[in-house]
Amino acid sequence: MRSFLLVTAFLLSLVASLGAQARPPQIIIDVARFRNLNKVEKGAEVEVYVTVPTQSLTYRQRAPKAFQSAATVTLEILKADGKPAYREVITLKPPVLTDTTIAIKNPQSFLKRVMLPDGKYTLRGTVKDQYRSTGGETTVEKPLVLEEPKGPFLTDVVLLAKPAVRSGGDDNFARGGYRLTRAPGNAYARGAENVFFYTELLNAPAGQPLRVHYHLTTPDGSAADADATLTPQSGRPTTVVGQLPMGPLPEGPFTLFIEVYGGPGGKTLLTGHRAVGQRNPNEYAPDGAAVPR
């Protein structure tokens, strides 16, 4: 009987492993547009955050009890006429595993910043499983429009897996004096209790206190709200960071609205922006959640 149970367990793990390998590799691309502050070459600074879940990659045995996957990601930004504005190939080699039946394999992520003139583009990302000869490639495309709005405006809202932390560092994960940990695909999974966010306010009247209103809502009408104040500085973006509790929100999609008000009593809407996310409390997210209590 014990031998039968061991064989059954082995077959189930083998089927699960083969099923994962049968799926094409996945690629998640998050894009955030900020303004290039260079007065000579006006345009946008585009942040492309790429995540490759390693669950669907093929693991090859490199040594006894040593298995590893490998993939390449080709990032391209094409102009409206189809000519390339940017292209780069990145090789990913996730950490070695001692057992491929492990259900949790951490995703691999990286971030690129690209300076581009205003205009219309197409962002294309292709992931290729290096250890699979057929069905091992997936391509995702997204339209990309770069333009500077008139008057005060908020840049794209970046949803974060963790609170923005003050940092004096100067690397791809630092912005506006903060270190940002992005939530891949704007998804919040098991253990996530708050939505964290970051954006930048530009062209607002300097030195004038403004009211910022945050509104988190879902299709069924569940909501959470908060207010804050900020005073824009002259000649530089004003960072807007914060968090809202997810307690009242059900599973599924949600929308975060950020609105900036000025004028007498802070009642005149100056600008606003939104970000759409997803709450999946039954799924595992290595980058996005604390251990449930």
Image (cartoon, rainbow, N blue to C red):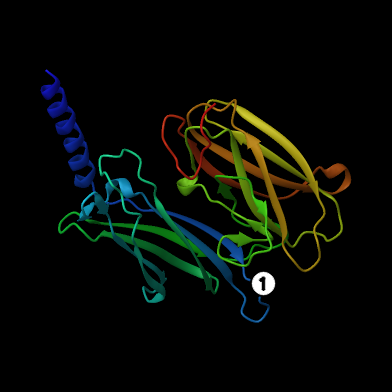
Question: Would residue 7 appear left or right of 235 to someone viewing this image?
Answer: left
Q: How many marks?
A: 1
Considering every residue shown, the one lying at the far bottom of the view is: 40
Judging depth in this view, the residue of 35 and 128 nearest the camera is 128
Q: Is residue 248 above or below residue 39?
A: above
Q: Position of residue 153 (x, y in %)?
A: 68, 57
Residue 100 falls in which quadrant of the image?
top left
Q: Position of residue 128 (x, y in %)?
A: 27, 60
Residue at the spot 18% in from the left edge and 57% down from the top edge: 132
Name the residue type under label 1.
Leu
Q: Position of residue 284 (x, y in %)?
A: 42, 36
Residue at the spot 85% in from the left edge and 49% down from the top edge: 263
Q: Which residue is mark 1?
A: 37
Q: Is residue 88 above or below residue 237?
A: below
Image quadrant holding the C terminus, namely top right
Q: Is residue 46 above or below residue 190?
A: below
Question: Would residue 91 appear left or right of 112 to someone viewing this image?
Answer: left
Residue 8 falls in which quadrant of the image?
top left
